[in-house]
Amino acid sequence: MGELNTAEILVQCLENEGVEYVFGLPGEENLHVLEALRNSSIKFITTRHEQGAAFMADVYGRLTGKAGVCLSTLGPGATNLMTGVADANLDGAPLVAITGQVGTDRMHIESHQYLDLVAMFAPVTKWNKQIVRPSNTPEIIRKAFKIAQSEKPGAVHIDLPENIAAMPVNAKPLKKEDLEKTYASYRSINAAAAAISKAKHPLILVGNGTIRANASEALTEFATQLNIPVANTFMGKGAIPYTHPLSMWTVGLQQRDLISCAFDQTDLVIAIGYDLIEYSPKKWNPEGNIPIIHIGMTHAEIDSSYIPIVEVVGDISDSLIDILKRTDRQSKPTPFAATLRMQIREDYELYANDEAFPIKPQKIVYDLRQVMGPEDIVISDVGAHKMWMARHYHCDCPNTCIISNGFAAMGIAIPGAIAAKLVHPDKKVVAVSGDGGFMMNCQELETALRVGTPFVTLIFNDNGYGLIEWKQIDQFGHPAFVDFGNPDFVKLAESMGLKGYRVKSAADLIPTLKEALAQDVPTVIDCPVDYQENLRFSQKAVDLTCEIDN
């Protein structure tokens, strides 16, 4: 074998990291990397937009815990990549972005499509670096994956100038080291156990860190043995099964909801794997007077509404087991949990038999839950429907409802569904989108057809930016600039070689979903939605009174 170039060594390093897919677009400045991938065990997924590629890598990373990899050329290719990179970074999904770049011989002058990409990606990544010495490539790639996958996971960026990519190099991939578990101090464990033993109305708030740490089983045992109710963030869905009698379902809406009553009653919040970006503590602890125990893999972020009395930093499962052994609460059930859970469930069941058309968002989500199995996956886009998915789509298992939360990026659902189907080809996958978010990356449905990832795209269709209209009416009493027209989504799907469906009554939805999920090509369901429910919910939030027994 002859001497390798930098691009070929880079691809060998990606293989060494266990990379299965690289999502991206071909360009002039990444030609050497593409040529190296052509002879690689890695499958290159050609996407229709760099944003779609980054979202695919983002969701792949969140579902697997291994860094998803996306590739673009320089200039506009790299700027298109940024939204998905930023989304992964804020939502704690490991991702490695690789960009092509002009040669180092023309960076000092005004040059076609040249941007300082290292400077540009710095605010949206954990770490980034330009490869300027071919022999440093193995170190840079190993460091990139180590940083991307270390707690808290996030995005890293590698910039590869085209002349460096072509240079010969004598190097080889570096050995991956196994990361040792970290353990919390006995002092913090004992302090947490003492505080929990004394609390009369403790409440667990669980976030995505619990899922990333594979600590759902330990969490469920901890809550069950200590009889403590559990609320999950949008990204913590499934950390405890929603059918569990102590599950209070989801917190995170920007308005008061029934679950807010639990925070009103509590005298101790046990935050487990919770990241402040998932739901600001200023929403549930505005005065900063609720005592908090922080249990996570990293120390708590600084926030005036989130000052823990104890921080238990280490492996989450081990921490929960050790605290459980030292806590004396078994005979002290939390008084309000059963009553509040009954109220939450009654509110959810109100829409089970609703026949109104256009369909209420609560009913759409309720019916979707009925046809999806416990381990099937939904990817929620961002918009008014996201609020209803967050509130009403409940999970038995971790990572079965993926929601862009920290960055809240529209357009993630369809690319994310492609990644989900690649990771879990045997599971049903549904991309849930508004008509606004759908039109932002619907071109990736061609990618889905080409790479053989059949999933359902369910569109909440209201001919407008419904979430912004909701906010405008709440704040100003009227909407502005939120209306638009749509193509015929059924014909659009059919023109791309997909199957399209249009829901014409509430009774249509479940049979349509079942038929669509049975297809061997991607499908699109156009479902008219009645977003008058948004304003009704806002009024209920204003009128909410917490009448639960203590």
Image (cartoon, helix red, strand yellow):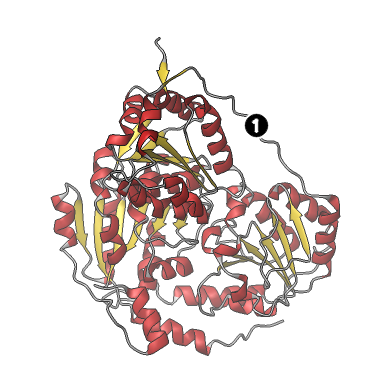
The structure residue drawn at horizontal position 26% and vertical position 75%, both measured from the top left corner, is 358
Q: Residue 169: where, in percent of width, then height?
A: 46, 19
Q: Residue 240: where, in percent of width, then height?
A: 60, 57
Q: How many marks?
A: 1
Q: Which residue is mark 1?
A: 178
Taking the view exactly as shown, the residue that stands out farthest to the front is: 109
Quadrant hosting residue 188? bottom right
Image quarter of the N terminus: top left
Q: Is residue 83 left or right of residue 223?
A: left
* Residue 400 visible to the viewer: no
Q: Is residue 335 left or right of residue 105?
A: right
Looking at the picture, which amino acid does disc 1 mark? Asp
Q: Residue 134: where, in percent of width, then height?
A: 47, 26
Q: Is residue 372 above or below residue 535?
A: above
The structure residue drawn at horizontal position 37% and vertical position 80%, both measured from the top left corner, is 470
Image quarter of the C terminus: bottom right
Question: Dot 1 surroundings within 10 Å: few (below 14), some, or many (20 or more)?
Answer: few
The structure residue drawn at horizontal position 54% and vertical position 56%, both measured from the top left corner, is 238
Q: Residue 293: where, in percent of width, then height?
A: 74, 63
Q: Secondary structure at mark 1?
A: loop
Quadrant hosting residue 426? top left
* Residue 171 visible to the viewer: yes
Q: Is residue 429 above or below residue 24?
A: below
User: Looking at the image, which is closer to me, 387 or 90?
Assistant: 90
Q: Is residue 59 left or right of residue 461?
A: right
Q: Is residue 175 above or below residue 255?
A: above
User: Looking at the image, which is closer to me, 137 or 193?
Assistant: 137
The structure residue drawn at horizontal position 51% and vertical position 33%, both measured from the top left corner, is 141
User: Looking at the image, which is closer to me, 373 or 74?
Assistant: 74
Taking the view exactly as shown, the residue that stands out farthest to the top is: 1
